Image: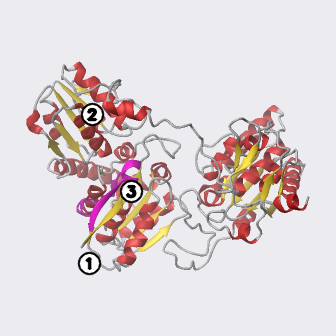
Amino acid sequence: MNSQLLTGNEAIALGIVEQGCRVTTAYPGTPSSEILAGVVKYKKRLNRDVYTEWSVNEKVAFEVALAASWTGLRAAVAMKQVGLNVASDPLFSAAYTGVKGGFVVIPADDPGPHSSQTEQDSRLLALTAKVPVFDPSTPAEAREMVKDAFELSERFKIPVILRPTTRLCHAVSPSEVDESSTSGEAPPAKFQKDPTHWTATPKLRYKLHTELNQKLTDIAAEFSNSKHNYIVDAEAGGAVGIVASGVAFLTAQQALTELGVRVPMLKIGTPYPLPTSYVESFCALFQTVIVLEEPDACIELQIPNRDQVRGRLDGSVPNAGELTPEVMFSILHKVFSAAGIQVNASPEDGELSAFIKTLSLPVRRPRLCPGCSHRSAFYSMKRTFGPRAIYPGDIGCYTLGTNLRAVDTFVDMGASITMANGFFQANRLAGDERAIVASIGDSTFLHSGIPPLINAVHTGARFVLLILDNHTTAMTGFQPTPANDYLADGSEAPRKVSIPDLVRACGVEYLKVTDPYEQEDFTEILKEAQAYAQSPEGGVAVIIADRPCVLYDPSPVVEEPLPVIVTDECDGCRFCTEAFECPALILRPDGSRVDIDYKICIDCGQCIDACYKGFIVPKVAEMAA
C-alpha cells in the first residue's frame, strides 16, 4: 500500500480496475479524457485483464459496454457531458431493458462551461431516462462511488451514472493504492437469450417501465440511508440550512469558513432518485434552505415542498455558470444577510476579493499552436474564397478557425457537413451561388460526419468539404482514431480504416488529398474543387488536408525545417498577426514591427506566405543577401 497523488479521473479509473470491470470504452472529450487512459495505466500496473477501447463515438462506446454487461461482465463507459446526448438513445432503452453485469456510465459535466458548447446537466438527462446518479465531491469519494455504483447496478439490474464535473476530474488529492490487491475472479462471459428484456416488444416495454419505476422507488429508499448523504454541523441549528452536492459542497464549506458562519449542511451524494423524505425532514428544520448544485437544478426540482427553498429556480443562485468560490461567497453572504446572520466579511471588502483583483491578467483568446497545419488550410481558404463565402465549422482544435474568420458556425460533432447542406439548399432557393466551404477534423468525420456526407451527396448539395486530417484526436490528448494503426492500450490494431476510401464509398466523385503546407498547390486545389461544385455535373467536392499534428508528430518539420526572420523593412501593419495569427509572431508594444518568438517558433516557414509585403523571409535567404 502506498500513497499517490491522483486526479479525479485517475481515481475513477483506479476504481474501475479495482472493482473487476472487464470492459471499459470511451470517446475522448474534456474533462473526461483521462479516465480511459487511467484504466489502461492501472490495468497494466495491477495486472488485470480489462478490454479498453476508444470507440468511434459515444453511442458506439455505450453499446459495446452494454453488450458486455449483458454477458454478465462488469462494464463502464466514459464521455463528456455532450457525449451523453449522442449516447442517449441506448441509455433510455437500457434503463428499460436493464443489465446483468454491473454497468457504470460516466459523463463528465463542464459547469462554466470551460471547453464545451453547453453546460448541460447530465443529472437531468438521467432523471428523464430514469437512471440513478452518484455525484462525487472529491477524487477519493469518486473512487468509492465506483464500487457502490457497480454494486447498485447489479442489485437492481440497472445502468448507474457516476457524474463528475470539471473541477473534480482535474483536481489532485492523495489516495492509497495497493498494487498487490486482487479483485477476485470475474465470472466468465455468458450471454443468455431473454426475449422479455433484450428483445422486448412495445407491450413488454410497458411492463419494463413499471418495473423501472419500482426500482427507482426502492433505490430512493436505499439512498435515504446512504453513507454519501449526511449532515455536517447538525448541532449548529439556526434559521438557515444548506443542501449541497458535488464540488459545490466543498466550495460552500470553504465559503462558510471565510464568512465565519456555522450552519447545518446536508450533503447529497445521490441526487437521483432523491431520497425526498430524508431531504424534506432536513428542510423542515429551517426558515430558509439554500440548494447549491452544479450546473443546474436537479435536487431542487425534486423537493416536493419548496416554500422555504432557495436556489437556481428562484434566482437566489445564478441560473448559469460555475459556482466558483467568489460566486459562492456572494450567494451565501446575501442569504445570511437577509436572515440577519452576522458574517466576517463582505464580497466588496473581503480579502479574497481584494486578492483576486491583483491577479488580473491581459485577456488572450485561445489560438492554434505554432506550425498547426489547420492555420495554413484556413489561411488559404480565406484568401481563396474571401469574406462572402460561408464557412461551416465543427468541434475540435479547428474551431479556433473562427479567429481567422474561416469558421462561421459550429453546433455539434459532424454539423459542419449538415449545415453546409442546409445553407446550400436555402441559398439555392434564393438564387444565391456564393461558395460554401465546410471544415471537419478526421476524428470528428469518423465520429459523426459520414451520415451527413451521404445525405449531402444523395440530395445533390454542392459545396467544398475540407477534412483536416492531422492523424490523431489532437485536442483531447492524441487518442487514436480508426484511421490509426494502434489501439487504446498501445497494441497494434488488426486493421485501420481509410478515410479516402470512406469518402468515395459515400458517393463523392471529387476527392483530392493534399498537404496544406504547400499553400500554392493547396490554393489551386481549392479553386478547382469550387469549380467542380458549381459545375452542371458537380456535387460535394472533398479535399483531405493531410498533415500530422505538429505536437503529435513533428518529424516532417524536424526533417525539413525552414527557419525565418522578419526583415528590417517590417512596418508593423499587423496583417500577419491578425490574418495568420501564429503565436510566434509578436507585435512590439509600440506597434512598430513584428518579431518572431524563437522559443515557440517551430521553423515551419508557413508565415512566409502570411506577409504579402515580403518582409518575412527564409533565414538562409537573408544571410545570403
The single residue placed furthest to the left in the displayed view is 235
Amino acid type of the residue tagged 1 in the rendering: Thr
The residue that appears at 37% across and 42% down in the rendered structure is 124
Q: Which residue is mark 1?
A: 182
Cα distance, mark 1 to mark 3?
Answer: 23 Å
Please report contact status of discs 3 and 2: CB closer than 8 Å, yes or no.
no
Q: How is the image coloured?
A: secondary structure
Q: Position of residue 526 (x, y in %)?
A: 84, 52
Q: Which residue is mark 2?
A: 291
Q: Answer whether residue 281 is visible to the viewer in this image.
A: yes
Q: Is residue 170 magenta?
A: yes
Q: Which residue is mark 3?
A: 106
Give the position of the C terminus as an image quadrant. Answer: bottom right
How packed is label 2: few (under 14 Cα within 10 Å), some, or many (20 or more)? many
Which residue range is magenta in the image? 148-176
Indicate which label's residue lies in the foreground, 3 or 2.
Answer: 2
Q: Earlier in the sequence, mark 2 or mark 1?
A: 1
Amino acid type of the residue tagged 2 in the rendering: Val
Q: Earlier in the sequence, mark 1 or mark 3?
A: 3
